[in-house]
Image: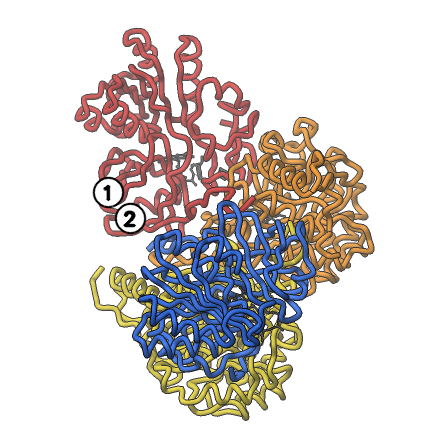
Chain colours: A blue, B red, C yellow, D orange
Amino acid sequence: MNHHEYEQKPPERPRMHGIEDVIEEALDTNTYWFKGEPGAKPGQFVMLWVPGAGQKPFGISYQEKGRFAVTVRKVGPFTEELFGMKAGDRVGIQGPYGRAFSCKGKRVALVGGGYGTAPLGFLAEVMSAGGSKVFVSTGAASSRYLMFRERFRHAKIKAVFSTDDGSFGHRGFCTDCLTGLLETERIDRVYSCGPEAMLREVARICSEQGVDAEFSLERYLKCGFGVCGSCSLDGTGWRVCKEGPVFTLQELGMITEFGKYKRDGSGRRMSI
Amino acid sequence: MNHHEYEQKPPERPRMHGIEDVIEEALDTNTYWFKGEPGAKPGQFVMLWVPGAGQKPFGISYQEKGRFAVTVRKVGPFTEELFGMKAGDRVGIQGPYGRAFSCKGKRVALVGGGYGTAPLGFLAEVMSAGGSKVFVSTGAASSRYLMFRERFRHAKIKAVFSTDDGSFGHRGFCTDCLTGLLETERIDRVYSCGPEAMLREVARICSEQGVDAEFSLERYLKCGFGVCGSCSLDGTGWRVCKEGPVFTLQELGMITEFGKYKRDGSGRRMSI
Amino acid sequence: MSKVPANLTIGLFGKKLRNPLILASGFLGVTKSSLKNVAQNGAGAVTIKSISREPRQGHKPPVVLTNGDVMINAVGYSNPGIEEAKREFSGLGDVGVPVIASIIGEDARELGYMAKNFLSREFAAVEVPLSCPHTPGYGLLAGQGTPEATLEITKAVKGSTSLPVIIKISANVQSIGEVAKAAVKGGADAINVTNTIGPGMFIDVQARKPVLGFGVGGLSGPAIKPIAVRCVFDVYEAVRGSGIPIIGTGGVTTGQDAVELIMAGASAVGIGSAIHFRGIEVFRQVCGEMAGFMESEGFSGIKEMVGIAHD
Amino acid sequence: MSKVPANLTIGLFGKKLRNPLILASGFLGVTKSSLKNVAQNGAGAVTIKSISREPRQGHKPPVVLTNGDVMINAVGYSNPGIEEAKREFSGLGDVGVPVIASIIGEDARELGYMAKNFLSREFAAVEVPLSCPHTPGYGLLAGQGTPEATLEITKAVKGSTSLPVIIKISANVQSIGEVAKAAVKGGADAINVTNTIGPGMFIDVQARKPVLGFGVGGLSGPAIKPIAVRCVFDVYEAVRGSGIPIIGTGGVTTGQDAVELIMAGASAVGIGSAIHFRGIEVFRQVCGEMAGFMESEGFSGIKEMVGIAHD
Ligand SMILES: Cc1cc2nc3c(=O)[nH]c(=O)nc-3n(C[C@H](O)[C@H](O)[C@H](O)COP(=O)(O)OP(=O)(O)OC[C@H]3O[C@@H](n4cnc5c(N)ncnc54)[C@H](O)[C@@H]3O)c2cc1C
Ligand SMILES: Cc1cc2nc3c(=O)[nH]c(=O)nc-3n(C[C@H](O)[C@H](O)[C@H](O)COP(=O)(O)OP(=O)(O)OC[C@H]3O[C@@H](n4cnc5c(N)ncnc54)[C@H](O)[C@@H]3O)c2cc1C
Ligand SMILES: Cc1cc2nc3c(=O)[nH]c(=O)nc-3n(C[C@H](O)[C@H](O)[C@H](O)COP(=O)(O)O)c2cc1C
Ligand SMILES: Cc1cc2nc3c(=O)[nH]c(=O)nc-3n(C[C@H](O)[C@H](O)[C@H](O)COP(=O)(O)O)c2cc1C
Ligand code: FES
Ligand code: FES
């Protein structure tokens, strides 16, 4: 037994990054670009620190040579603070953390709801470049919230869009279009990120059709690297920040709280 | 600037080693064998910890595949404690520390006085194996204190011996024999370890003859790895435990206290 | 040295633990499922995250950071409060190992209330941290680290529950032996030493600001182990006569670390930050290393090692 | 961010230092030659190893150990005593940078004696550590860490020398702000915070014994930096109004570390253990890193950074 029984860990603390560029992806939805090579895999997230305002998790939405980005939906005090920031301002970035999507599958469907589409953009590009045939079904409340339309077109990724109000594409849910894709496109794996009600529907469909699937879950994260337990899931105790955020369809079946409830920052249950 | 601007250091603390064997080299002079591969170079030393008794420096005197040894002269309370120990007992070993002999030279003379011969045994074997022609001149008060006679013979290293009382070999000093070696053997480098009066004489001879030389110095060591300053040398401030214990003839000239005084554990000067 | 098969089991509060490693409070102990997951990874017992009377959101994130061998945290005792916690921590048999409750309160009276109203017989014991260095209203910041406060609080909790009571004390006091003696005098059944050290602070030099949401936080992890060892050593000397067991907590990451605390005087060992430094498998790894050490050094049981560095 | 050439010089006690890095007391400061060697390796000023009235052999070795990011020591103030130290530390101009004396004593009276009888005008200042956690008769173990003792000692030393007086205080007290204020009230010209932390203990599990000759020792090195940062931050808040400079000491190993302490409120920075962790070249390396940081962040001088984490 010596001092080096275990590998030295890198520091877990934010590093300041100047915002390179802010791009409006959709209504209340901005992409923040940073210099750097975090070496993230699709599905991983970073903890974003705004001194004074707090620290919150966001999935990596773009990663290119020398730069990367997160795409943020404005929903509350922290994201509002972010929306007040512009190129040149600095934020702290910690991570990337978490288990990524497996990137398996030859013909895959990516199903994204709301800002859940953010990590799927990155996944689509990586899998497409890796030779998989990628289909995307993404939905939002209305056309003004739809993101990455240009991006998918540019990458020659077949994407279908749904809106709750029918203002663009299919009127209804992105899960409706998933059913269509499964019927026509010989999909061998589904990747999904978005509101939990939507994930539940994707899980139901994939179970029925016998298609493998992966899901990115959201829970209240505090530390982001597996020590505090605020993101532990009932049934298994798995940590969303460590064993997740991505779980397989099979794993989902063991997470008893899935689709039912989650916890807030104090640990109190809130139904979904 | 990141966390890894500097290399991680290994721990500086003793590791317990069972004594494998105790060999009497000469009167009041024991060799303690240990299992292990410290990767030491000749001239380096270890700090030897005997719980309760203290911790003191000793040069490595043997290093073979899978084992190594120090050779200790009984001179005071700590070394007496060591002389009470036997195979199976454990001591703590920390190091190896310090700058080693350079091992340069095609035809070299090793001059050792008293237990100063200990590290030269190791040096002789290494240089001999490295293809150098090694001559040894070693001296002691009387024949009963002479060490490594068998060892040098066995290694086919030409060794000459001196005793103060003439009980074996040359009556007089090992430095006398050095002069002879320099005259007859085309020596290109001298290595020396022993009482400081003897080192001074070796330095004088080598200066006169224009031969490069290296000297292993002793000062009071506390930490052994360069932080406390108890072994700092006047003139340069070099630390015996870090920049030394081996110094070149040229360096010796800059050490103003050499041959004159040293300091005790409190830092008080004592003349040599 | 003879080879004997090492037996890691210990007895604590009349219960048998399969090994002396206890999940430290505040790590993963938010839910029963999470505790069970830790148990499945090898812990001998687990402690829940500390519960207060009312729900608490805790300090603003960042709440935990690391650098080198140091972890720093200022979580600020986020917890769902007594009512929800009662629901959460029921049916504890599912966990598979003994579950220790942890309660906090602003004073002896509130802690007495917590003990009376929160603790079910399903818990194996209750731990009372008087030692958090970074949460206003609690622990050191509420003066709970003195011998006087320790005595008063220990008595109040003892008087309100029949569960064994563990008093968790701080390294950040000069008179740690006095605090330990006060806990013994108040009737404590065990002492846990230590909580986090400090507090400390991380400043980001580019942001030019402290990083933790609360500014300062307590230190844990491998870097604090020497302090934990000294604290256990000192507390052992102080309470030796009483026979009270010590849970040694602070920086334990390897089997050798655990043995170090045990030789200093601990009967059981808390593990927290190592869940980060080595992963959640750390409990099993430390057990393996302890067993290996004991076998090669000829120890057949934990008890033989407790406090032997004092002899 | 504009690029400006960084100027590392600072003014301290009316002297100009070429950079804010000061060799901490107890490292290599046994002889004048050794101090000079440190100066040649880039330090802005140097502190001698603490001197007592009578010679002291110190604690039995091992006296210093390390593990990971932690150094532990119990040297026990070995020093040759006042008479020999006077001879040793004369002709200090040779050193090339300002030399700070360090004196210890068992009480205010002895420290007054030391100040009167040891200090020559060749020293740039005198430092008085009231904060060693592991030497019986001195520092914390002699009760010198309280606000009352700090006030009394500061006054006694101030009354016995015309040199600027630096009071070196400990992180191991709850009321660090009060101690700092007492030093200011007593007339101190600077505060050095912090001494070593703890104490801590290393136990060798095979020897089954504490390793340091004295058993326990103070912690230093990278692992304690977060505590030093917090202490400087707190002391800065406490003494802000007085304009007294703070020397921040503890764990500084990189330029970023030095900047962190400066932003917390330090005007100068002590460096000790880093001599081991990075080698004696550390002073020059840290200067280079500080200059690089300042240039890229648009700071032109040290003063601009002092305490800015408070705003
Ligand atoms: C793994 C993961 C990846 C995420 N990726 C993205 C992303 O790519 N883009 C994006 O816009 N959002 C993402 N989120 C959600 C994002 O973290 C929240 O929108 C954000 O924290 C809201 O903060 P707020 O103060 O603006 O709003 P609040 O008013 O504080 O909260 C709004 C809602 O956000 C959620 N939330 C708040 N704090 C947290 C927290 N610390 N951890 C998790 N959820 C929180 C809660 O459900 C809350 O109801 C992700 C969350 C997780 C867990
Ligand atoms: C680099 C180095 C290598 C050495 N190698 C050997 C060796 O191979 N074999 C050997 O027998 N001895 C060696 N020594 C000397 C050995 O360290 C001392 O003989 C030993 O420390 C004496 O301890 P003691 O308690 O028995 O005697 P003491 O009565 O304490 O001291 C006897 C003399 O030993 C010296 N000494 C004592 N303590 C120390 C100390 N901590 N550091 C340095 N010198 C000390 C002093 O000059 C003292 O006068 C070496 C010393 C140094 C510095
Ligand atoms: C993130 C975190 C949260 C903690 N929360 C609590 C807590 O709620 N109650 C408590 O008594 N101790 C708490 N602690 C202290 C730990 O239980 C433990 O005493 C300390 O971390 C030292 O052990 P370690 O070095 O093994 O982590 C917390 C520590 C950390 C790092
Ligand atoms: C080996 C050693 C010896 C020390 N001796 C002294 C001393 O004599 N006087 C003193 O005031 N501080 C002494 N200290 C404390 C240091 O000056 C310094 O305050 C502490 O080590 C923290 O700084 P660092 O982390 O840079 O080492 C000593 C520290 C060490 C490690
Ligand atoms: S956020 Fe802390 S464990 Fe997941
Ligand atoms: S023995 Fe400490 S510096 Fe050499």
- Label 1: state its secondary structure: strand
Q: Position of residue D282 (x, y in %)?
A: 56, 38
Q: Position of residue D258 (x, y in %)?
A: 63, 45
* Foreground pick, D278 / C159: D278
For residue B85, the mark is: 2
Q: Left or right: where does residue D254 sit relative to residue C252?
A: right
Q: Mark 2 near mark 1, Cβ–Cβ under 8 Å?
A: yes
Count how many numbered circles sit on residues in the image. 2
Dot 2 beta carbon under 8 Å from ligand 2: no
Q: Left or right: where does residue B192 sit relative to residue B221?
A: left
Q: Do the residues at discs 2 and 1 belong to one chain?
A: yes
In the rendered structure, which amino acid carries the disc numbered 1?
Val
Check the residue under mark 2 and report the chain it is in: B
Residue placed under numbered mark 1 in the picture: B22
Please name the residue shown 40% across and 8% down the image.
B209
Q: Is residue B172 above or below residue C37?
A: above
The quadrant holding residue B78 is: top left
In the rendered structure, which amino acid carries the disc numbered 2?
Met
